[in-house]
Amino acid sequence: MPSLRSSSRARPRPPVAALKDVPWAGRRSHLGRRGLAIGIDIGGTKVAAGVVDAEGRILAEARRSTPGADPRAVEQTIVELVDELSADHRIASVGIGAAGWMDLDGGTVLFSPHLAWRNEPLRESLQKLLRRPVLLTNDADAAAWAEWRFGAGQGESRLVCITLGTGIGGAMVMDGRVERGRYGVAGEFGHQIIFPGGHRCECGNRGCWEQYASGNALGREARQLVRTNSPEGRALLERAGGVAESITGAAVTALALAGDSTSRELLADQGEWLGLGLANLAAALDPGMFVIGGGLCDAGDLLAGPAREAFARNLTGRGFRPMARIELAALGPRAGMIGAADLSRVSGRAYS
């Protein structure tokens, strides 16, 4: 996704957090904040890695296809990427971001939806193979940290990050710390039930937020429209080569950006649901800013505009309380890589 901002206002850069104030920092930390680190973002189809400096700049990148669901094969891929990038750079630490739940100690992947990691002691194994400190974190936490440190959330003390893709992910940075909850599994915002008895979600419940405000939801609504044979869906069907099942959220977004009125209406509907969910989160968490990232944000203000309107309309105590800003993410698809690398540099969690 190209970098997007919802406004051109300059934001002050926060001071680099003191080590004692960053997540999981301990007195026995051995890393400073100036060395180079490698960030690795593990997805369902690719493993992307980059050398990241202390200012959040990516100096070199490499990637591989995700090698199926075999944990040992994934470990070997990580080793290959680190070896490749280390050939030309002196690397102090490695940060790994992946979808899933990590234990609070950061040593074990409790569960990952894309890979066969179930109670997998990944950090210990990788530290032996890489001979460097390794930090293991959730990919949404890594992306939120990157946006807070280097992106749209700079200067904000209480940040909630929402990622709109296949589903809805989330993370929080509160007072310079990644807030992970009591058991390390906070941020599953996409599974708040926003429409009881609504669409069935992959999690097993009905009416989850991600069934109404995600890329998958946008594609589903477009396909349903086309199946009615409405002339309003003609452009969508033509773009899909006459096959309704081929219509995706990305296709709807592209048509909306090209000016198709029906696609813009569909995006506005998604924005309504997005704003409603954000109002619920504001009632519970009271952040100063929501940063919205993920592929669906290619739509820019076609999505963010209706979301802001719905947020203001549904916010508890509206008119009598300050309202959180809603901004589009600035770092694009590399945010997870940048955040994982930076967390490995400033955190003592991985080797206390």
Image: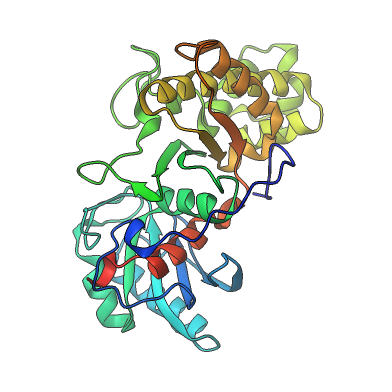
Q: In which quarter of the image is residue 187?
A: top left
Q: Is residue 225 left or right of residue 80?
A: right
State whether residue 231 is above or below residue 214: above
Residue 255 rendering spot, x and y as whole percentages: 75, 31
The structure's colour scheme is rainbow
Residue at the limit of the structure toward the right, as seen here: 259
| Residue 312 visible at all | yes
Number of numbered callouts drawn: 0
Residue shown at the point (35%, 68%) measured from the top left: 74
Residue at the limit of the structure toward the bottom, as seen here: 87
Residue shown at the point (31%, 84%) measured from the top left: 131
Q: Nearer the viewer, residue 145 or 196?
A: 145
State whether residue 248 is above or below residue 113: above
Q: In which quarter of the image is residue 244?
A: top right
Q: In which quarter of the image is residue 115?
A: bottom left
| Residue 201 visible at all | no
Q: In this view, does 272 lie to the left or right of 112?
A: right
Q: Quadrant of the C terminus?
A: bottom left
State whether residue 185 is above or below residue 193: below
Q: Which of 27 and 152 is in front in this view?
A: 27
Residue shown at the point (40%, 18%) measured from the top left: 199
Residue 41 rendering spot, x and y as whole percentages: 45, 61
Residue 221 rendering spot, x and y as whole percentages: 57, 21
Residue 249 rendering spot, x and y as whole percentages: 60, 33
Residue shown at the point (52%, 39%) measured from the top left: 165
Q: In this view, does 343 lie to the left or right of 315?
A: left
